[in-house]
Structures are given as structure tokens and as C-alpha cells.
Amino acid sequence: MKTLLKNARILTLVNDEIIEGDILITDNRITKIEKNIKDKADKVIDCEGNLLMPGFKNVHAHTAMIFARSYADDLPLHEWLFDKIFPLEEKFIDGDIYHLTKVGILEYLTSGITFAFDMYFHTEEIKQASEEMGFRTTILFTSLNDKVDFMEKKVLSNRGDNLVNYCLGIHAEYTTPIERIREIAALSHKIKAPVFTHVGETESEVQGCVERYGKTPLKLMIEEGLFDYGGGGFHCNYFTDEEIELAKKHNFNIITCPCSNLKLASGIAPIAKYQKAGLNIGIGTDGAASNNALDMFREMYLVSTLQKVTNKDAACMDGYDVLKMATLGGATALGLDECDVLAPGKLADIIMIDLKNPAMQPLNNIKKNIVYAGSKDIVKMTMINGKVLYYNKEFFVGEDVNEIYRKAQEVTDRLKG
Ligand SMILES: [Zn+2]
């Protein structure tokens, strides 16, 4: 199956240039990026001068949490989590995560997100939903019930061109016994695999760890050898200078989730400082329960503007750097080197940005337009693994979208009941 995307502007992210040309895709991979490709194709899409670029990588997600979107807002974090979210999660039955995950994936497609680093229960259901819809996901193991042998087998089966892969993790220091942290560190050493976790999200989390262990959480986990083979942390709002140094030494990736941190009043990650320290940075939406949108455009806007205002320096964060965090930064964090940039041989995870949308005009600086004036409204196409899953506001995911909504509503009503 050959698909030809014609008459495009292309930001490959191999370099910073925007070129004019066509992209030829054979099955799930890019085979040519050139001017005026003459090859015969089964499907030809005229891009009419719009921009093709790599899809956004949402590197922190709890996709199925759409059930709690706008269900328990405007509450203190502890009350929100313990009184509202946890009781609903206790009512999950088989199939719930599968149905809920599908709605989250639909929303990702509308925001040009072609990959999610998903962390939730019932990992087999996340896998099934992702594969059926053609969506690329890495599933993070964080349940204390996941057996070491099972995780080892799954992580060793990873391949760059799988739609679904796996990664080692713990939920967070404050929810994980030290014996489990050591068990995961030992497995990471055995199979030389990276580990990811929530860390430094709130001040009370850091204080609690200091009370328990006499040290801050990232320092504790690094000393336990959890990140000797890389990995990273979600949120990272509160790191000491010593932890930043240690993070750099361990190739520890920062995953920032500004919307969730603002809405739960957790804090603001010092991203400009991390960037200066040379740390790799990716961006995540976190779950819809705490965001409440699964939208990379809002996240990018906030990553940049929050740094400007907290540093009282409008020049401290460049919009194009943030666009690269949302794409390349996320890909680097997860080792997604088969779908990081647009080049022959790479997987075809491509989005089309509608430059004819008034918010994209005039074309002074397309990259900064996307970060500072962009929204889901400018996403014209989302292609994953060579398949167009979203085009001109229509979904092509192999099933009726209204049926997906109906099932997720049914699950949600039962959980709330
Ligand atoms: Zn999270």
C-alpha cells in the first residue's frame, strides 16, 4: 500500500528547516521525501501547502481516566484523589479500561498526538484498545501486582515498530514499599531497561519522603539504582540542585505536565533551569481527571509562558524549543528512534497542520504560530503507522465513534452509581 502526500510544507525535525515537497509512504514507513514525487500510489492526498510534521508524543498519560473528566473539580488534591477518584477506581470490572481508553485515543488524534506513554490498570485492555484503533502506545508497569517475570518478558519483547511496547516503572515513592523499589531496580539492571515514575509532583510528597528516609525522593531512588539504565520522572516540580546534577549524570528525562500541575495547585516545574542544565524534556497531558483536556497545544503554550512569568524573563524559553520538547523530546525520553523525525526509513507517524486556519495566518513564523496561536482546531490530519486515523475532523478508526462514546458513558454512569 503506497500513500503519497503531495504539495506540502514539511518540518522533518531532522533539522530546523521547513522545506516544500512530497512524502511517499509504503505500508507503515516513509520511503521518500522529495520535490514532485512521480511514483504511482494507491492513495494521494493533496496537502495544498499545509504543514506536515512528526506527531506529538504525549509522554505522561492515564488515558482511561476520561471517566473522571469534570466529575470532581475544584477540590484540594488530597480530597480529590482519596474521596473522589480512588472510590470510583475500585469499581472497575473487566472491559471498562478498554472502552474508556478508546475515547482518550480519539481525543489524542484530534490534538495531533500519535503516541502516548500510558500508565493505568488492566494493561491488556490498554493494549487491545490501542491496537484495534491503530494507536501507538508504550505501557508503563506500575501495579504492585505485576510479577517480575511477566514484566521482564513483556519488556524484552519490545520492538521499535510494535504499536504497543512496555516499560518498567513504579507509581511513586510514596505509594511503593522500598522492597518493591529495590525489586524493580534489580530487574532494570538485569535487562538493562529504563524506569519511569511520578516524582517531585508536590511539596508534601517531598517532605514525606524526607521524613521516611532522610532524603528527597529522586535522590533516594537514584541511590537505590533505579535509574542506572536511564528513565525519567513525571512532573519534576521540586528538585534540589543536587538532584538536578544527579539527574544529568543518569540521563534522567524530565516529563512536564503543566495543565495538571496548575489545576491541582501542585506547582510549576523549573523547565528553563532544567533546560540550562542540559536535561532532555518531554511533555505529557497527565489524565483527563486532573487536566481536563488531552491537548498538547495547551501544554506547549503553558510550558513556555509559565517559564517566562516565573523567571520574569520573556526570553527565557523559546517557542520552537517547546515544539521540539513536544515531539523530539518525548521521542528521546522513550527511545522512539523509529518515529522521532520524518525521514526515509522512519515509521509514518505524521500530522498535517492547517495553515489556512486564520490562527495560522500570516505565515511569519509557522513553528511559533503552532505553539503560541495553535489549538486542536489546526490539526487537519493525524496519521499513525502509515494510516490516516483522523482527517478533516473525521475519524477512521474502524468503528463507529458514537458507539465508543456510548460504551464509555455506560461505564462512567456505573462507576458513579
Ligand atoms: Zn500521573
Image (tube, grey):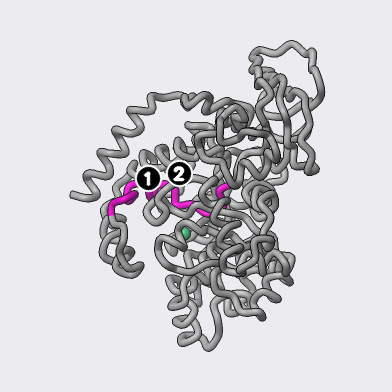
Of residues 312 and 194, the one nearer the viewer is 312
Give the residue drawn at x 67%, y 38%: 54
> What residue type is disc 1 on?
Ile
Tell me whether the residue at label 2 lies in contact with that at label 1, contact meaning CB atoms closer than 8 angstroms: yes
Q: Which residue is mark 1?
A: 97
Quadrant in which residue 410 is drawn: top left
Please say whether residue 76 is one of the residues in the magenta stretch: no
Q: Find out if the beta carbon at label 1 lies less than 8 Å from the nearest ligand 1 atom.
A: no
Please say whether residue 67 is one of the residues in the magenta stretch: yes
> What residue type is disc 2 on?
Ile
Specify the segment rendered in magenta: 57-71
> In the rendered image, is residue 128 in sight?
no
Give the residue drawn at x 42%, y 67%: 265
Q: Earlier in the sequence, mark 2 or mark 1?
A: 1
Residue 55 vs 74, above or below: the answer is above
CA gap, disc 2 to disc 1? 7 Å
Locate residue 312, reporting x and y percent: 61, 68
Looking at the rendered image, the quarter that the N terminus falls into is: top right
Locate residue 24, reporting x and y percent: 73, 22
Instruction: Look at the numbered disc 2 and give the secondary structure of its residue.
Output: helix
Instruction: Look at the numbered disc 1 and give the secondary structure of its residue.
Output: helix
Quadrant in which residue 169 is drawn: bottom right
Locate residue 197, reporting x and y percent: 54, 64
Q: Which residue is mark 2?
A: 126
Give the residue drawn at x 57%, y 58%: 305
Locate residue 120, reporting x and y percent: 43, 53
